[in-house]
Amino acid sequence: MTGTMAIVGFGLSTIGPGVATGLVFAAYINGIARQPEARGLLQPIAFLGFALAEALALIGLVLAFVLK
Amino acid sequence: MLTETLLSGEFEPPSAADFQFAPIFGDSILFSKPVFLVALSVILIASFFIISARKAAVVPSRLQFAGEGVYSFVRNSIGQDVIGPEFMRFVPFLFTLFTFVLCNNLFGIIPFLQFPSMSRIGFPIALAIFTYVVYHYVGIKHHGLKKYVKDICFMPGVPKWIYIILTPVEFATYFIVRPATLSLRLFANMFAGHLLLLVFTMGGEHLLASTILMKILSIFSFGFAIGLTFFEFGIECLQAYIFTLLTALYIAGALADEH
């Protein structure tokens, strides 16, 4: 089996952001379920949390390409 | 092996080399495609908003409505809701950031251009430096240099022994990590998105040049590329919004009086 350690490293680095994204949107869905009027208030916070969590996964992807 | 009989030749996957462009004329990197795209974005944004604000009527035309919609989105939901009472003096900066990042990101899916200029790391770094200078300057002007640095390094309201671990973390966050992640987030999103589109498009082309079975499979590859284009549109708008929102949050944090 051939490949590079960089790809393995990237794969491992997506565990954390994957869990984090699930947690963020689970909280968002819960908040809307409890109070549907809060949807507009919670939406920016949900997207902000998602982007912050995804940043780390994407840094891992970029490094997998740059540091072959 | 099976792949050698079905496919024609070795597939060359897209890599970081696909993001480098030779200069169009002259020798300097200043005359390559990403720089021309950035210049084009400036012209487009300026002309769009100048034309939409000309002959401003109380009952707006469609173009004026669109221009005012973008402006009021940045001014209200990013400026006013995040920064608070003093938001008006930051609205030009936030509005410029938002429209500049959005226009350059959208170049990634517009046909014939099809390159997000923010996927060259220099441009996000430059924007993050702007943000860095602005939020530190605002904090220093509001609090005074000594109090500002002291509040960052020695956050009031925590027990003294926590300062051993809190001060390096806080210092690194405010002075190193924030501009780094701000630029890296935008760059990595645009890099990864463009790379994904390249994989499915070039893979589809490679399949199309092979045997008949692969030609049928290439339809799925191109279909996926189309789907990813729509997804990429959403990501591009989201990244412009996130960059501007985080800038506003950092400015609001620098202005905050609770410390």
Image (cartoon, coloured by chain):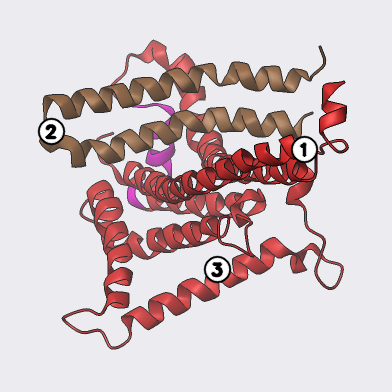
Chain colours: A brown, B red
Q: Which chain carries label 3?
A: B
Let me know if marks 1 and 2 both belong to one chain: no
The answer to which of B237 and B1 lies nearer the viewer is B1
| Label 1 crowd bin: few (<14), some (14–19), many (20+), radius 10 Å | few
Q: Which chain carries label 2?
A: A
Q: Residue furthest toward the bottom?
A: B55
Q: Mark 1 lies on which chain?
A: B
Q: Where is residue B179 in the image (x, y as percent from the top left)?
A: 53, 42
Q: In which quarter of the image is the C terminus of chain B?
A: top left
| Label 2 crowd bin: few (<14), some (14–19), many (20+), radius 10 Å | few
Q: Is residue B152 visible?
A: yes
Task: Identify the residue at horizontal 39%, vertical 58% (top origin).
Answer: B94
**Mark 3–mark 1 distance (CA, rounded to whole Å):** 29 Å
Q: Is residue A54 left or right of residue A68?
A: left
Q: List the residue tagged with mark 2.
A: A36
Q: Is mark 1 on a helix, strand or loop?
A: loop
Q: Is B143 contained in the magenta span?
A: yes
Q: What element carries label 2?
A: helix
Q: Are marks 3 and 1 in contact (CB under 8 Å)?
A: no
Please say if B72 is above or below B81.
Answer: below
Q: Is A38 contained in the magenta span?
A: no
> Which mark is drawn over residue B13?
1
**Mark 3–mark 2 distance (CA, rounded to whole Å):** 39 Å
**Mark 1–mark 2 distance (CA, rounded to whole Å):** 46 Å
Q: What residue type is labelled 2?
A: Pro
Mark 3 against mark 2, which lies toward the viewer? 2
Task: Identify the residue at horizontal 64%, vertical 22% (top origin).
Answer: A10
Q: Where is residue B79 in the image (x, y as percent from the top left)?
A: 29, 54
Q: List the residue tagged with mark 3.
A: B41
Task: Identify the residue at horizontal 74%, vertical 45% (top origin).
Answer: B208
Span highlighted in magenta in the image: B142-155
Answer with mark 3 or mark 1, whichever residue precedes in sequence: 1
